[in-house]
Image: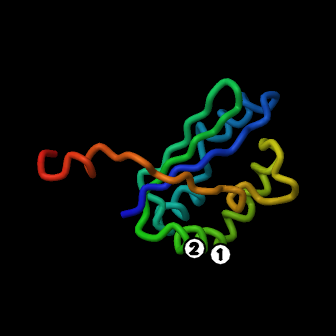
């Protein structure tokens, strides 16, 4: 299982709207994410607009491709595009660049976990 984390930046003037949009994500978007292999997916948003995403998946590239093929993802990305800083015409889901994991407690604990 891959653990994926990424950063994006939400426009400060759109923070409340972004939070509201995620309080009740479209049911078909939720199903598409789950069906595409996005597990344990969470978003964390700071008051400065820094957005941290986290998910677990068997294959991140395959999970992204599966989502890109859904109609609901195209609609969601279009709806979300105005919330983000410096995307330069790139869809939010295409701007996600996974961070490199440098520490995981259970990995270092090994058999002691």
Quarter that holds the C terminus: top left
Nearer to the camera, 8 or 42: 8
Secondary structure of the residue carrying numbered label 1: loop
Render colour scheme: rainbow
Above or below, comparing residue 64 to residue 19 in the picture:
below
Tell me whether circle 1 and circle 2 mark residues in contact (CB < 8 Å): yes
The picture places residue 25, in percent across and down from the top left corner, at 60, 47
In the image, 3: left or right of 80?
Answer: left
The furthest residue to the top: 47
Q: Is residue 76 visible?
A: no
The picture places residue 89, in percent across and down from the top left corner, at 87, 58
The picture places residue 104, in percent across and down from the top left corner, at 34, 47
Spatial distance from mark 1 to mark 2, Cα to Cα?
5 Å
| Residue sitting at x 64%, y 71% | 70
Nearer to the camera, 35 or 84: 84
Q: Quadrant of residue 67?
A: bottom right
The furthest residue to the right: 88
Q: Tag 2: Cα neighbours inside 10 Å, few (<14), some, or many (≥20)?
A: some
Instruction: Read off the residue under disc 2.
Output: 66
In the image, 111: left or right of 14?
Answer: left
Quarter that holds the N terminus: bottom left
| Residue sitting at x 58%, y 60% | 28
Q: Is residue 60 visible?
A: yes
The picture places residue 35, in percent across and down from the top left corner, at 48, 68
Instruction: Read off the residue under disc 1.
Output: 69
Above or below, comparing residue 86 to residue 57 in the picture:
above
Secondary structure of the residue carrying numbered label 2: helix
| Residue sitting at x 51%, y 53% | 100
């Amino acid at each position: 299982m891959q653990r994926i984390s990424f950063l994006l930046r939400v426009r400060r003037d759109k923070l409340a709207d972004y939070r509201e949009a995620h309080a009740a994500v479209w049911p078909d978007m939720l199903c598409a994410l789950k069906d595409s292999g996005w597990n344990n997916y969470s978003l964390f948003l700071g008051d400065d607009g820094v957005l941290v995403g986290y998910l677990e998946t068997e294959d991140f590239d395959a999970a992204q491709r599966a989502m890109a093929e859904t109609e609901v993802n195209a609609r969601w990305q279009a709806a979300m595009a105005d919330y983000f800083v410096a995307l330069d015409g790139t869809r939010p889901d295409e701007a996600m660049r996974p961070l490199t994991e440098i520490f995981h407690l259970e990995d270092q604990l090994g058999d002691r976990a």
